[in-house]
């Protein structure tokens, strides 16, 4: 049996101790997974500004620089953040409405490992509190097209999903063309800003008694769904029920 060499164990122990010491003194060189994002580049040599030894980064350390009330609105030095897109009217502070205030769940400041980036959550409306998720206008600007400009108030979810804006679950131009005498305010047909229902009796020409009398005169008994036949106000219907059925009438 070979005689053990105590000095070898000491050499190994000293090397391990040196590696641990270097990891604490120069963590950005020894254990960092990659360069920091440009916004945090000034912290490249100060890992402990965000990380606690053996415990990693924490939301509490993030909030020591990024105050929760200012996140998304102002920088860490209090300066207003610039607007990113021309269609936005300003910055939106939705971080304050998150169900779980866990910064690392969505954000990774190191540009290194792909595995680390895959563990991050993409933004989802499910991360928001219910009242914030239902208030679309708090984060989104109303579209400026001809159809949406007429909407004074309404629930976006009646036509759009929170997974994606397009395609909408309801396309007005395919069901009923808004031109000529029907280029009117939405509430004329959608009473109480309820866009899941409609009524043609909001105009004096479309009183229920007059519509009933004219259709019965032509032998039409089922006229509950107006847009089933009348999709283009400038064209008389050739046949009944062509294409997709409309929404429920009031």
Image (cartoon, helix red, strand yellow):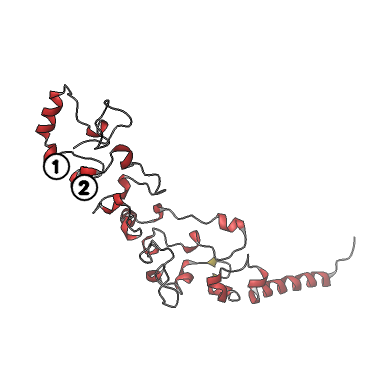
Note whether residue 50 is visible: no
Q: In the current view of this chain or complex, which residue is farthest to the right?
A: 1
Q: In the current view of this chain or complex, which residue is farthest to the top?
A: 219
Pointers 2 and 1 in contact (C-beta within 8 Å)? yes
Q: Which callout, 2 or 1, points at the residue further toward the start of the chain?
A: 2
Closer to the camera in the image, 214 or 80? 214
Q: Secondary structure at mark 2?
A: loop
| Real-space CA distance between mark 2 and mark 1, rounded to the nearest whole angstrom | 10 Å
Closer to the camera in the image, 52 or 26? 26
Closer to the camera in the image, 197 or 234? 234
- Residue 65 pos. (x, y %): 46, 74
- Residue 143 pos. (x, y %): 33, 55
Residue sitting at x 40%, y 44%:
167
Residue sitting at x 47%, y 63%:
103
Closer to the camera in the image, 164 or 67? 164
Q: Which residue is mark 1?
A: 203
Note whether residue 177 is visible: yes
In the picture provided, is 110 more to the left or to the right than 245?
right
In the picture provided, is 48 more to the left or to the right than 159?
right
The answer to which image quadrant residue 208 occupies is: top left
Vertical placement of residue 46 versus 117, above or below: below
Q: Which residue is mark 2?
A: 184
Vertical placement of residue 27 versus 190, above or below: below
């Amino acid at each position: 049996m070979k005689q053990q060499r105590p000095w070898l164990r000491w050499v190994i122990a000293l090397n391990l101790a040196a590696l641990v010491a270097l990891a604490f003194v120069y963590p950005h060189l020894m254990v960092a997974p990659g360069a920091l994002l440009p916004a945090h580049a000034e912290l490249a040599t100060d890992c402990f500004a965000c990380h606690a030894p053996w415990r990693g980064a924490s939301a509490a350390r993030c909030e020591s620089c990024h105050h929760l009330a200012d996140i998304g609105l102002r920088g860490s030095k209090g300066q207003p953040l610039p607007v990113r897109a021309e269609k936005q009217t300003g910055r939106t502070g939705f971080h304050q409405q998150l169900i779980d205030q866990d910064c690392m769940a969505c954000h990774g400041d190191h540009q290194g490992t792909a595995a680390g980036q895959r563990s991050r959550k993409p933004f989802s409306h499910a991360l928001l509190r219910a009242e914030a998720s239902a208030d679309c206008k708090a984060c989104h600007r109303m579209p400026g097209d001809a159809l949406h400009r007429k909407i004074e108030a309404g629930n976006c979810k009646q036509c759009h999903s929170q997974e994606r804006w397009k395609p909408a679950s309801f396309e007005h131009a395919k069901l009923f063309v808004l031109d000529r005498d029907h280029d009117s305010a939405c509430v004329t047909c959608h009473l109480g800003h309820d866009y899941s229902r409609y009524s043609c009796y909001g105009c004096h020409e479309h009183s229920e008694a007059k519509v009933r009398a004219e259709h019965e005169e032509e032998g039409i008994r089922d006229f509950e769904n107006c847009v089933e036949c009348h999709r283009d106000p400038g064209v008389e219907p050739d046949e009944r029920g062509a294409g997709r059925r409309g929404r429920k009438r009031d």
